[in-house]
Amino acid sequence: MQQGFRRILAALAAPLMAFGLVAPAAAEQQQWAAAYVDWTFAEDATAAARAEQEIRVAEPGRASFFTLNWDFEVGEGGYIGLQSDEAGAHNVRFSLWNATSARGAACRRFDGEGVGMTCELPWAISADAFYRVRVVRGAADAGGQWWSGWIDRREAGGRVVQTRIGDLRVAASSNAINPATIYNFSEFWGDAVPACRDVALSAAIFAPPRIGASTTGAVSTARNPVGRRPDGHLCNGRERSGAVSRHTPIALDSGPGMILTLGGSIPANEGAARRLSGR
């Protein structure tokens, strides 16, 4: 998983370099400032044509990312999620490793520790709202297999507004999501800080992911969320690398979820988790 952490950082940085927003000698990024949530699907869960998850970003922080990640049954996969940049502006991003083509005005290539394509749209995050991110298998053609990234929001009257982030094409063999590889990832990807307690505080609630064997119809819901941090890189406040992190289980209408608070001092991090959990 740590390889995936470094590669996501590379994918985030590449578009900035391409547009001249980051100089080649940019400051080093904070290392190991990440945390994960692993999920379990039923043993009989089949390879999926779609995956979706509701995510509430209660504290977007800055230079922070909140993603749903997966691999394909054949080939590397990708991620979809919400992000704040270093200035605090928000966006939503959909990326696939080894993608070769894209449809969408805001899609571009990335390289670094791996290659692929990413699609990004500006998105104003409301701290009280759950957003549903979705990746859905599209048509196959002579060039490979298309996948679409979506984000849905619910208006005050209950109407669901669906927004297409973009479409990406991968190899024809990458035509199904492996349920066993689905996890969540939260990170601070900003510049290195003097002490890990100085990482910007962020907080998100992850509802259980759902998958479907077809692009419509019945779904299977994940269970048993388990929190995880990068091995050997814990932060107690004064270390140079890492970030304070906490995983707090929460009961949601859709099933057992997980609060992930990352960054800040230990008291600030614990306080954010308590407020979100109601404890």
Image: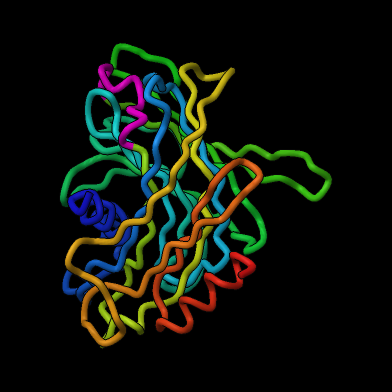
The answer to whether residue 19 is visible is no
Residue at 43% x, 16% y is 139
Secondary structure mainly formed by the magenta segment: loop
Q: In the rendered view, would you say 104 is above or below 226?
A: above
> For residue 220: magenta?
no
* Stretch in magenta: 171-181
Q: In the rendered view, would you say 266 is above or below 178?
A: below
Q: In the rendered view, would you say 268 is above or below 162?
A: below
Instruction: State the image coordinates of residue 219 (x, y, percent, origin top left).
Output: 54, 24
Residue at 53% x, 50% y is 257
Q: In the rendered view, would you say 125 is above or below 88?
A: above
> Foreground residue, 144 or 128?
128
Residue at 56% x, 72% y is 274
Instruction: State the image coordinates of residue 60 (x, y, percent, origin top left).
Output: 51, 67
> Foreground residue, 110 or 92?
92
> Foreground residue, 225 or 98?
225
